[in-house]
Image: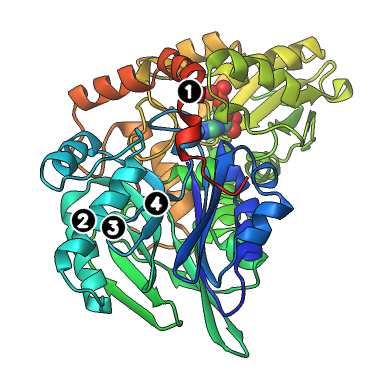
Amino acid sequence: MCGIVGIVGNTPVSQYLYDGLTVLQHRGQDAAGIVTIQNNTFRLRKGNGLVKDVFHTRHMLRLQGNIGIGHIRYPTAGTSSSSEAQPFYANSPFGISLAHNGNLTNAEELKEWLYKEACRHVNTTSDSELLLNILGHELQSIGNFTLTPDDIFTAIANVHQRVRGAYATVALVIGNGMVAFRDPNGIRPLVFGKRESEKGTEYMVASETVALDACDFEFVRDVAPGEAIYITENGQFFSKQCAENPRFSPCIFEYVYFARPDSTMDKISVYASRVEMGKKLGAKIKQEWADEDIDVVIPIPETSCDTALQIAQTLDLPYRQGFVKNRYIGRTFIMPGQEQRKKSVRQKLNAIGAEFAGKNVLLVDDSIVRGTTSEQIIDMARASGAKKVYFASAAPEIRFPNVYGIDMPSATELIAHGRELDDICDLIGADKLIFQTIEDLVSAVSVANPDIKAFETSVFNGQYVTQDIDQGYLERLDALRNNETKETSDKNADSIIDMHNEGAE
Ligand code: AMP
């Protein structure tokens, strides 16, 4: 998962972009980048690491200009090399730069088409660089030196025709302005807001509303699936539906795990949806574990806290923070490589013995992906003296790879792939295990916005909303992105870092 921001302002924007990226840091900790436009020239700084580590004062001082975009990266397709850090840049037409959250599912064909038909070379394995070049090609094909809003929207409509998959995107076109668009399924979120200043209206787009809050922009609305918004360099706003057949199906995993609880996307409060997940799961536990002998409900911090508290209330049980989280360590799952991931669970969480000693505990997590976290946490609970350890997952069994930008690439790595409840329970070492049903999850998330008729739920049921995913595709993805490939690519990454890291050092 990645995070994107973009601002067309009346004063320098780099500090706001930095602040916006900082509050979106949970969406990816691998790399960060900002590009601004000053005097028809891009100013770019990007590199591997957290926002606070990539941008130093000297970089910020050089990121001049009243218009800019930013990106934070979480590695999915490709490697975690800094040559894959975004925003990407292409010099033609006009000079364009783009940042993307999501994953294109027809990247292989696009790459071939770009090379053979459009004579465009992409220099990385990133599908976002492909998207940039497709957009560049479509803008160029318009053939106008001065682009009108309709020209921009025609280009985006053509991008929708060529590209498949998930793409929440923001791009700058020198001499023109900022364009932001969302794929016809609206899989990844994109919101926009505005702020009045003495010099007129300023606009901001972002992956989550929390970024608007942090930069003092007032939320206006979500970008609709298939829609593009275009803000000229001098602040004129235009929007248009550019997809022929938009079919809204936002990714449900944003609510389960990714987004911050203080964000609202597609009119759904992430916090409220997690509380609702707790109500549903609490009711299921009550019904299925009639003879339950749970003494205390303990969340696995932090994503599951709101859900666990609600489960405790529904079951009329005490809720205790039995694990302490080291705040200075990143999200464990995001670290590439299984070994590193295993080790960091222990570094990240520690148990408070008194909350476990002699008790039957119900541990609550937002999801079980590979099972690494749950297995180690259950061990920790037992080592701290728990009598019985029950485990509840706010999300259903994750059985299928994700192809839309979440790092769950390989079915064989998923603990629930091809396994039923009892096997999973044995493997993680719990006394009892319970998962939310998919129906309950969908209903928990859609309570706040019943207008959404479908969600992207492929990791649970294998139904891919773009309808272009077959077994062959999943097998290729598996081969490309299994742990071994990733670890090898990480080792190789250094050799290509310098080609792209032209940022102001
Ligand atoms: P595991 O089952 O050990 O692979 O990890 C599951 C934990 O990682 C859960 O507790 C979630 O909090 C977190 N998690 C779930 N999905 C993801 C994801 N796609 N990326 C990063 N972390 C995740």
Q: Secondary structure at mark 3?
A: loop
Q: Compare marks 2 and 3 and give the one earlier in the sequence.
A: 3
Please tell me whether residue 42 is drawn above or below residue 9 in the rendered image. above
The reply to whether the residue tagged 1 has its Cβ within 8 angstroms of ligand 1 is no
CA gap, disc 1 to disc 2?
29 Å
The residue labelled by disc 2 is: 137
Q: Secondary structure at mark 4?
A: strand
- Which of the two residues, 440 or 411, is positioned nearer the viewer here? 411
Please tell me whether residue 260 is drawn above or below residue 489 in the rendered image. below
317 lies left or right of 176: right
Point out the residue furthest to the right here.
Answer: 354
| Residue 431 position within the rendered picture, expressed as x and y whole percent measured from the top left | 62, 13
Residue 40: image quadrant is bottom left
The residue labelled by disc 3 is: 92
| Residue 433 position within the rendered picture, expressed as x and y whole percent measured from the top left | 55, 21
User: How crowded is the residue under tag 3: few (<14 C-alpha within 10 Å), some, or many (20+)?
Assistant: some
Query: In what quadrant does ligand 1 lie?
Result: top right
Is mark 1 in CB contact (under 8 Å) with mark 3? no
Residue in the image at 26% along x and 56% along y: 135
> What amino acid is found at the position of numbered circle 3 in the picture?
Ser
Residue 460: image quadrant is top left
Q: Compare marks 1 and 3 and give the one earlier in the sequence.
A: 3
The residue labelled by disc 1 is: 495
> What amino acid is found at the position of numbered circle 1 in the picture?
Ser
Placement of the C terminus among the 4 image quadrants? top right
> What amino acid is found at the position of numbered circle 4 in the picture?
Tyr
The residue labelled by disc 4 is: 89
Please tell me whether residue 197 is drawn above or below residue 484 in the rendered image. below
User: How crowded is the residue under tag 4: few (<14 C-alpha within 10 Å), some, or many (20+)?
Assistant: many
